[in-house]
Image (cartoon, grey):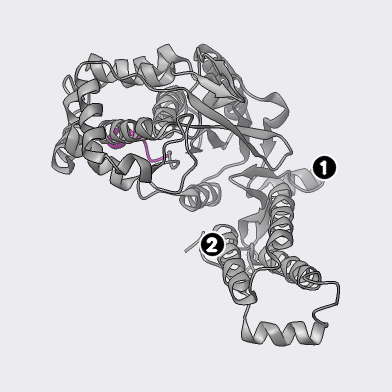
Amino acid sequence: METKLGRIADKSAREARPIFTSLYHLLNEEVLLKCHRELSGNKAVGIDEVTKEEYSRNLEENIQRLVTKLKHKAYKPQPVKRVYIPKANGSKRPLGIAAYEDKIVQLGLKKILEAVYEPKFQNEMYGFRPRRNCHMAIKSMCGSIIRKRIDYVVDADIKGFFDHMNHEWVLKFVGYYIKDPNILNLINKFLKAGILDEGRYETNSEGSVQGGNISPILANIYMHHVLVLWYKAYFEKRGRGNSFLVVYADDFIAGFEYKSEAERYYRELQERLRKYGLEIEMSKSRLLEFGRYARERRKRRGEGRPETFDFLGFTFYCGETLEGKFCVIPRTNSKRFRKSLKEMNLWLKYNRNIPLKELMSRLNQKLVGHYRYYGVSYNVQMLVKYHYYVVNMLFKWLNRRSQKKSFTWEQFHMMLTYYPIAKPKRYVNLYG
């Protein structure tokens, strides 16, 4: 399988317009078994409530039956189970949980789509791609603003991107390189599988439910055609002055040297998205003055400090290094910061009675996870602040393990010498 996918990727990288007419046969017993082994066994179950462990009891028989259904075009995905995850702004993000067998097929399909499309994706794209992550997107954005003459930033938010991807356009975009009708038909089946929301079945005429294995790659293909190639053709190559674009899934930031170019991009962006069934969330989108000279110009006009913008959980400010040079300063977004503290407080409340050694071990895992994401250049101060609040919450909840107060502050600090709490530190250098 890996050799075949490697050859597909090589062909895609070498040719300007590669055409793949026969890929469906790659969804064979060997591939589906490999996908089964790669899937996590502790994820939430779909509407059939089948776990990986249960599917494994008759694995050979189950996989053979699945391959037969695929060969005879009799395979039909089950509706996904919808769940809601709280967001930092108080709203809820809908996620879909596919049935276990559907997860296997989706993972196999994802491998095929990645082999074809990964060599075609542009450097501006960072979300859900091998060997790329959020920190690389942030580093690219900050570096572009500092190295280039960037004076204006377009901070735009697409309203319900995953829910509004047009199915016809999804299949057209995938079909630009893939001409295998069986692959396209299988993708269409997943897009039309429907949703079970609190026992109610809903058809989905548009969108790709978040949470599935193929949703991220389909989203990248959509953004590649709708946003990235359009930007590169009409702004990077033909536009005036310097510019940049950084995309992470459906989140993106664009920067421009000239205000007229930024205004043109913002205006034409709305027209471009409408053509493909999308629209901007106007309340969360704007054009702002931001960059090396923004502070001086705004000061002359009596407008105060430069505005800030949010991207991938951080708020970005115009700032200076210790040497007095211009720098883009990231800070943990205030809504994310409060949400993370609220979740930590609830976690400590409900886990305060487990053995102290286990509690501290699990707490440190959570803290290090927070530090690894938010521990970037110029943001250590926010980590220290987070650490301070967590230590105080820990003291509060340990003293509620029983009716009698468990610790004085002196005893609490003594306990921390035996079970040290993870200290904040920078993990990612954005300017190195």
Whether 229 is among the magenta residues is: no
Q: Where does label 1 land, which residue?
A: 303
Magenta segment range? 117-124
Q: Residues within 10 Å of mark 1 (few under 14, many from 20)?
A: few
- The answer to whether residue 211 is left or right of residue 106 is right
The reply to whether the magenta stretch includes residue 119 is yes
Residue topped by disc 2: 372
As helix, strand or loop, the secondary structure at mark 2 comes to: helix
The residue at the far front in this view is 57
Q: Where is residue 207? Give x, y as percent.
A: 50, 20
Identify the element where label 1 is drawn: loop
Q: Are marks 2 and 1 in contact (CB under 8 Å)?
A: no
Picture disc at residue 380: none
Q: Looking at the image, which is closer to me, 320 or 410?
A: 410
Q: Nearer the viewer, mark 2 or mark 1?
A: 2
Snapshot quadrant of residue 50:
top left
As drawn, 233 above or below 212: above
Nearer to me, 168 or 375: 168
| Residue at left offset 45%, top offset 28% | 223
Occupied quadrant, residue 332: bottom right
Height in image: 232 above or below 305? Answer: above
Are there few (<14), some (14-19), or many (20+) residues within 10 Å of tag 2?
some
Q: CA distance from mark 2 to mark 1?
A: 36 Å
The amino acid at mark 2 is: Arg
- Identify the amino acid type marked 1: Glu
Residue 107 drawn at (x, y percent): 33, 36
Residue at (70%, 68%) from the top-left corner?
A: 353
